[in-house]
Image (cartoon, coloured by chain):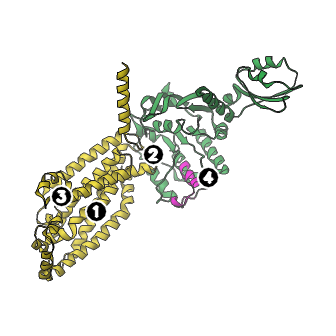
């Protein structure tokens, strides 16, 4: 099974001293998909990616990247992967072109699966995100450095892209262009694993989404089904003012807003059957449901966690 | 590894030229200065005789007359303090060989490419070695330019010998800084610790020439095995081999550590000691419960 997966982790654990960053992380990313890895800062996204590249060593669990154990053969993994770090830094004394050529030269031909970049393709990428390769790195803005990072990750057409917050620091137009390039890479056969806390971009391009919370993956689902499933928002208009507590006591229902007692906005987690049966006792004028955004689902997970902790 | 080596060496380019050329200029000046000193030998002897003898001994010259021999002159005026001067380069370069890239965040990107940690380590270490040899070679060439036309009758091979001795001591302090950078939480702390040890070694070695009681301690001091300019009269290869051997051991320890530990990102380094103490306390607590 793990041979056919681009990324496979089971029970992955990593601690920094007394801080447990990953607490048994299970993850399966299929080949050819765009997988969005969602979580707030400190949830363990970057730690996971750095374990996949053998930059840090897990304390326990299993990791396979393209069927290879990164600790046993890190060079073979890196030969087939393009990586954009979350904290991106270049040698400031280089120009964009010399930095890209240097990184390209690190992909020696002797490594199986390692491909050097086609320079025409590099120019194509730079044109798309409006990046001049003649500029000195030290003169670039944070956003432009991020563009260099995106180009170096994509330029050798890797089988697997590991992108840690790829649109961080980019203006909205370039963000869109980067997301388009990521989709283009997927269309050409690459698997894309990208972490983000910008939910709209995950929603826009990811085939599947994994939500990480305190070092554990709490949910993995198709992006569309995650949005459609389980969480709904309902706006109910009553003929007469209603006590919202009567609805708040229904399991899975949370009162989000209450205007004048006649209009109530609810968030419903799970099936609506209990709510609808409860509403039968009231005179309802209007009942509207909305699809929640991924952001709302994401926040619901974290809110549940906070309540659990409390 | 070839790419890593070339890139690292190109980053040393400025330092090789800066250190090399400035010290080469000093070496030309010193070589030319010898005849001026020799011409005024009697006046200098009177002057030196008025100084406490300990001052000369401190800088590695036992008698005033020795200052007028080619090796004694170059030792006192140049090589006695060159271990500290170029030692600063060795310590900064050794401590920053890997740790500075970790601290400025550029190592993640390099190691995300098909480059093994071993290749990165060896490429960087060879570049450090080449840079040190480059600085010393430019320095040596400076002397070869400065010596002709002076009464310093030293040939090219004899002139190379103090640089071989200097190479040994630079390797030792450079690799000490490297191994400390793999063990301590930051590059700065590694450089500072290695620097303190180098200066301490300089004083212990110098004071041991004045105080017999310090001789035993001085045997542990690396600079005790640095001949300086006196190597012109004959190089002690055993001392050089010893210094290079200990340097090789430091390199192996640093390599072993680098292969096994996490690649740090800026500000992530930490002491292992508090963690071990915490673990020890937990074990004691667990034992008490049982």
- Mark 1–mark 4 Cα distance, whole angstroms, equals 46 Å
Of the chain colours in the picture, the one used for chain B is yellow
Query: Pointers 2 and 4 in contact (CB under 8 A)?
Result: no
Question: Which subunit holds the residue at mark 1?
Answer: B
- The circle on residue A16 is none
Q: Which residue is mark 2?
A: B265
> Which range of residues does the magenta coloring cover?
A132-150
Residue at the far front: name it: B288
Residue at image position (43%, 51%) is A105
> Element type at marker 2?
loop
A126 with respect to B182 (left or right): right
Q: Is residue A71 visible?
A: yes
Looking at the rendered structure, whether the residues under marks 3 and 2 are on a common chain is answered as: yes
Query: Pointers 2 and 1 in contact (CB under 8 A)?
Result: no
- Mark 4–mark 3 Cα distance, whole angstroms, equals 61 Å
Q: Which residue is mark 1?
A: B86
Q: Could you tell me what secondary structure mostly forms the magenta stretch?
A: helix
Instruction: Report crowding for label 2: few under 14, some 14 to 19, many 20 or more residues within 10 A (C-alpha).
Output: some
> Does the magenta run of residues contain A137?
yes
- Mark 3–mark 2 Cα distance, whole angstroms, equals 39 Å
Front one among B89 and A17: A17
Indicate which label's residue lies in the foreground, 3 or 2: 3
Instruction: Report crowding for label 3: few under 14, some 14 to 19, many 20 or more residues within 10 A (C-alpha).
Output: many
Indicate which label's residue lies in the foreground, 1 or 4: 1
Label the green chain with its letter: A
Q: Is residue B226 visible?
A: no
Instruction: Report crowding for label 4: few under 14, some 14 to 19, many 20 or more residues within 10 A (C-alpha).
Output: many
């Amino acid at each position: 099974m793990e041979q056919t997966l681009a990324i496979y982790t089971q029970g992955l654990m990593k601690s920094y001293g007394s801080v447990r960053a990953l607490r048994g992380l299970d993850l399966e990313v299929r080949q050819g998909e765009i997988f969005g890895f969602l979580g707030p800062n400190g949830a363990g996204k970057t730690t996971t990616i750095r374990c996949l590249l053998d930059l840090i060593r897990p304390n326990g669990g299993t990791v396979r990247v393209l069927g290879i154990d990164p600790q046993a053969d890190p060079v073979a993994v890196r030969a087939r992967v393009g990586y954009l770090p979350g904290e991106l830094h270049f040698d400031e004394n280089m120009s964009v072109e010399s930095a890209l050529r240097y990184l390209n030269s690190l992909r020696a031909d002797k490594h199986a699966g390692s491909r050097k970049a086609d320079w025409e393709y590099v120019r194509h990428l730079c044109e798309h995100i409006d990046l001049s390769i003649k500029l000195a790195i030290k003169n670039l803005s944070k956003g432009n450095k991020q563009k260099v990072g995106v180009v170096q990750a994509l330029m050798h057409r890797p089988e697997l892209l590991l992108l840690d917050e790829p649109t961080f620091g980019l203006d909205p137009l370039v963000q869109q262009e980067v997301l388009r390039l990521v989709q283009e890479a997927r269309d050409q056969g690459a698997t894309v694993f990208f972490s983000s806390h910008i939910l709209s971009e995950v929603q826009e391009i990811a085939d599947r989404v994994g939500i990480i919370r305190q070092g554990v993956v709490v949910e993995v689902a198709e992006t569309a089904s995650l949005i459609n499933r389980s969480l709904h928002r309902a706006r109910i208009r009553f003929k007469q003012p209603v006590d919202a507590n009567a609805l708040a006591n229904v399991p899975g229902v949370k009162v989000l807003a209450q205007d004048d007692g006649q209009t109530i906005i609810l968030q419903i987690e799970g099936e609506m059957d209990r709510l609808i049966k409860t509403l039968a006792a009231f005179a309802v004028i209007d009942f509207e449901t909305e699809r929640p955004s991924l952001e709302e689902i994401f926040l619901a997970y974290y809110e549940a966690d906070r309540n659990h902790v409390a | 590894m070839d790419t890593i080596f070339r890139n690292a060496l190109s980053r040393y380019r400025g330092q090789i030229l800066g250190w090399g050329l400035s010290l080469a200029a000093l070496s030309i000046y010193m070589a030319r200065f010898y005849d001026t000193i020799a011409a005024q030998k009697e006046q200098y002897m009177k002057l030196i005789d008025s100084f406490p003898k300990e001052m000369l001994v401190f800088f590695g010259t036992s008698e005033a007359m020795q200052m007028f021999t080619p090796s004694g002159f170059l030792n006192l005026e140049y090589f006695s303090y060159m271990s500290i001067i170029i030692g600063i380069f060795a310590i900064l370069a050794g401590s920053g060989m890997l740790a500075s890239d970790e601290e400025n965040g550029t190592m993640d990107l390099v190691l995300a490419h098909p480059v093994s940690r071993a290749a990165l380590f060896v490429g960087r270490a060879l570049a450090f070695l080449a840079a040190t040899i480059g600085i010393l070679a430019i320095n040596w060439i400076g002397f070869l330019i400065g010596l002709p036309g002076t009464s310093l009758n030293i040939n090219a091979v004899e002139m190379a010998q103090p640089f071989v001795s200097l190479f040994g001591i630079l390797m030792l302090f450079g690799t000490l800084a490297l191994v400390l950078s793999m063990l301590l939480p930051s590059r700065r702390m590694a450089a500072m610790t290695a620097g303190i040890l180098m200066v301490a070694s300089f004083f212990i070695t110098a004071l041991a020439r004045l105080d017999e009681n310090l001789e035993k301690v001085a045997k542990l001091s690396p600079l005790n095995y640095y001949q300086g300019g006196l190597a012109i009269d004959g190089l002690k290869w055993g001392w050089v081999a010893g210094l290079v051997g200990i340097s090789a051991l430091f390199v192996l320890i640093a390599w072993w550590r680098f292969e096994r530990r996490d690649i740090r990102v800026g500000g992530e380094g930490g002491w292992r000691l508090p963690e071990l103490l915490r673990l020890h306390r937990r074990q004691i607590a667990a034992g008490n419960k049982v």
